[in-house]
Image: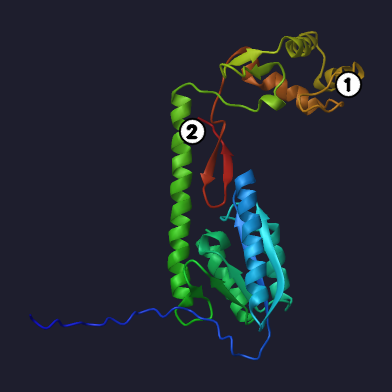
Amino acid sequence: MRDRTITKITPLLKPVTFKDNTKTILRVAAYARVSTDHEDQQSSLLAQTEYYERLISTRPNWKFVKVYADEGSSGLRTERREEFNRMMEDCLAGSIDLILTKSISRFARNTVDSISCIRRLKDKGISVYFEKENIFTMDTKGEFLLTLMSSLAQEESRSISENVTWGWRKRMADGKVHFAYSRFLGLDKDEKTGKIVVNREQAKIVKMIYRLLLAGKTGHTIAAGLTKLGIKIPTGKDVWSPSTINSILSNEKYKGDALLRKEFTVDFLTKRTKKNEG
């Protein structure tokens, strides 16, 4: 039998480990985020919070600070994540030494935001550890790996955005119309067929509004009259406003048409929308 030659390949990247033997007490916080407020996502957020509380509390040289958790927020824009911004403020104020988070995509999907936040924290001597990618920002190769992985997370968001856009276009091409029935006066969704049906009682109010307009009444006068009659607006409130009247009068769905894609997203990163002019 021939002798086998075994070649051992040394890994290029060594796993990041925390030095538990240090006498320095680290003030440790964690960041968690879910992108929707659905019930299953809320359970995930609760599980993440409990996990980090236990993890930090078991380390003898770690002092638990807080778990910052954002619910129903996108990872592309940090300005809309209240808990993330609160965490950054606490870090820059000197209250935190180390941040734990599940992955780079949970921290931020925007490469520029991710790198700029990490650099601000590093300037203050604050490190971040990403569990899934096993990246420690104070490591010599940490920023390079972080830039690479953040770019991948950002491209994943671009792909998701493009898929969502394709789905909307496909539904429009099939003639499928979706709108907020709870905020729409005179039309309901049939529970059995899923089709649009006329709400006869509310339709009387819509017809009244159009008749008053044809009679020369302004939006302000019509709103005041409906409020005086005790008729509730589509959202259930008691006081009508001229803007609500004008919205009904300018909505093409009240004449049986549906104009879709009135606005579109210009940039998937900023989520900035623009009026569709054709």
Residue beneath the point at 63% across and 67% down: 52
Mark seen at residue 168: 2
Q: Is residue 108 visible?
A: no
Q: Quadrant of residue 177?
A: top right
Q: Amino acid at mark 1?
A: Thr
Sequence-first tag of 2 and 1: 2
At label 2, which amino acid type do we have? Answer: Trp
**Residue at image mark 1:** 227
Q: Nearer the viewer, mark 2 or mark 1?
A: 2
Q: Is residue 70 above or below residue 254?
A: below
Q: Name the residue nearer the viewer: 197 or 256.
A: 197
Outermost residue to the right: 228
* Numbered-mark total: 2
Horizontal and vertical percent position of residue 147 = 46, 68
Q: What mark, if any, has residue 207 been given in the picture?
A: none
Tell me the element at label 2: helix
Q: Quadrant of residue 95?
A: bottom right
Q: Quadrant of residue 78?
A: bottom right
Q: Nearer the viewer, residue 47 or 135?
A: 47
User: Residue 36 at x, y = what percent?
Assistant: 61, 47
Q: Secondary structure at mark 1?
A: helix
